[in-house]
Image (cartoon, grey):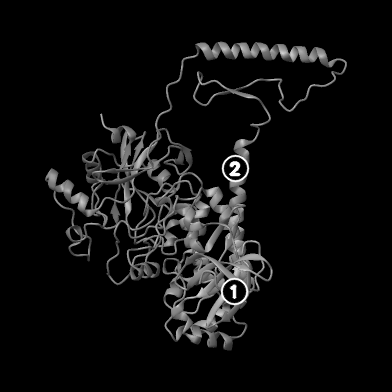
Amino acid sequence: MLGKTIAHYRIEASLGQGGMGEVFLAQDTTLDRKVALKFLAEDMQQDSNARLRFLREAKSAASLDHPYICKIYAVGEERGKSFIAMEYVQGATLKARLAKGPVKVKEALKIAVEIAEALEEAHKKKIVHRDIKPSNIMLTGTGHVKVMDFGLAKHLPASEGEEQEQTADLTQKGSALGTVPYMSPEQIRGKPVDTRSDIFSFGLVLYELLTSVNPFRKGTTMDTAQAIITETAPPLARYTHEIPELLQHVVRKMLNKEAERRYQLMHEVRIDLEDLSKMIERISDTTLNGVDLETTIPFTGLTPSTTVTLPGFDPRSVPGRVEKGQSKQRYYVGGVSVCMAGLILVLALFWPKAGPDPLPLPHEISTLTGEMVLVAAGESLSASGEVGEVGYADFYLDRYEVTNLLFKQFCDETGRSYPPDPEMIQDYFLGKPDYPVVNVTWQEAKAFAAWAGKHLPSLQEWERAARSSDDRLWPWGNEPPQGEANLGGKEDGSEFMASVAAFPLDVSPYGVEQMAGNVAEWTALFEDGLGREVPVIKGGSWVNQLADYGETSPVVARFKPENRTRMDGVGFRCAASTEEIQGP
């Protein structure tokens, strides 16, 4: 192909090849400009339906005129070869950028907003892209986005009859056009798609922007397709704790398996992303506010982060004529400044030197009894239900509930009896090793924690890990569960519990999973009046309905004065202080 001329395009170099065809750099000899020339793949050139669809849908995309969309100049066919002439964009694909790792939240939102703008424009023209993926998004040299390759775009018809005609055209060959790791569930099933399919694909791109991970990609295409249809994307908090909860909610909603439960319009996605971007900008501006308005001098001898502001000095001021009466004032201010600077110098020389900054604690650690995540100290609910300051340092909490397998190891090593199986579930303890242990007394839970070198979490520790202190109703936010949590037990006597990792969307701000359902959990509360710890059940279980949680506090707290009680729906997880983790 190199050196050949197709129509008035002289082909100069190959730019890449994909499943649908090959793209070349070409010179438009008529308008004297560089273009990208895409040819339909050879095996599809012989398919008349594929050629007609290629040309028809490319013509639809040619109607788009937006700064973040690659322009299509012409479509045509010559010497039996169908081609599209489009804007030649210099830069790197988003795929190439992600090969270096995830993108910071602020930059990711900027990119995402521009992609959303481009897709919103396409959807307004009733065009569905159907192949949104990182390799089809360019980052130009000016730092902006170009959404590429509308060659697979589908023009949504204006009438029901047109829809039926086009659907038959696409499905009679059993085709599911697109790239499997970025397809929507309905796209993989070969069902008719609309703009909500692009929203799902865009959600996968945004997920990958923030984590550099495609949550559904498996070893084979078939396994990947099955995962998109059946599996839930792991929470973003599993990969990073820097993503705001509101952004996590946006991504979750975009990736809902059911199109009816996703965002319905790209306009809604774009507005939410813009609001988040502005919020983060405001936070950045507030953090930096005043830095350039005063002169600050670091004194590392005081504390690692101490800065001293010299009063009376404004770096924005420019020397000029001194008005009558101002000279005396300036001498006074200057004298005070000199005295203050001298005092600061003395303090810097003789103040006890601070030691080096402690190494930051890892966000997650592996222990012999499971993975734990870091929970920062701060405010949480007090015993009376009011928010109060927690009086201890950072701590770790098990990501999952203690499993039957772990509790069996504890029983075998200590000679304890196994807990009884739940009612109506035979062979639960021994037959389901990755399910949460239940029918364990509060005392047994404490004994397990001590055996593991940990402790049973206090009510306040559990509450902080579940919801932090931002007044959220659920660990994942304020939205009621839509498959996030294992709630509302069945009435037919079938199995109610699930494995500890079965509901990954039931995740707290710190990455602790299944704190709102599956099994409720034993915690401890020290009551001054009693002079001892008392057991408290937190979290609710599979038997709880939404109504059980109330309007303001969905995380159940129930005092159990009898600490030897066994319950089918109550398990536990362990906490650990940094001292317990580090050992003596």
Q: Considering the numbered disc 1 on the image, is that residue within a helix, a strand or a loop?
A: strand
Horizontal placement of 112 versus 383: left or right? right
Image quadrant containing the C terminus: top left
Crowding near the residue tagged with mark 2, few <14, some 14–19, many ≥20 C-alpha atoms within 10 Å:
few
Numbered tag placed on residue 469 in the rendering: none
Q: Earlier in the sequence, mark 1 or mark 2?
A: 1
Horizontal placement of 566 versus 308: left or right? left
Residue placed under numbered mark 1 in the picture: 127
Instruction: Indicate the quadrant where residue 443 lies.
Output: top left
Residue 142 coordinates in the image, percent (x, y): 62, 52
The answer to whether marks 1 and 2 mark residues whose Cβ atoms lie closer than 8 Å is: no
Q: Amino acid at mark 2?
A: Ile
Q: Is residue 159 above or below residue 324?
A: below
Crowding near the residue tagged with mark 1, few <14, some 14–19, many ≥20 C-alpha atoms within 10 Å:
many
Q: Residue furthest left?
A: 415
Q: Residue at x 18, y 46 (%)?
A: 410
Q: Amino acid at mark 1?
A: Ile
Of 227 and 406, the residue lying toward us: 227
Instruction: Indicate the quadrant where residue 227 lies.
Output: bottom left
Q: Is residue 449 above or below residue 539?
A: above
Q: Residue at x 34, y 61 (%)?
A: 542
Residue placed under numbered mark 2 in the picture: 283
Of 170 and 509, the residue lying toward us: 170
Specify whether residue 282 is in view: yes
Q: Residue furthest right?
A: 324
Q: Residue at x 38, y 45 (%)?
A: 462
Horizontal placement of 221 versus 328: left or right? left
Residue 225 coordinates in the image, percent (x, y): 38, 70
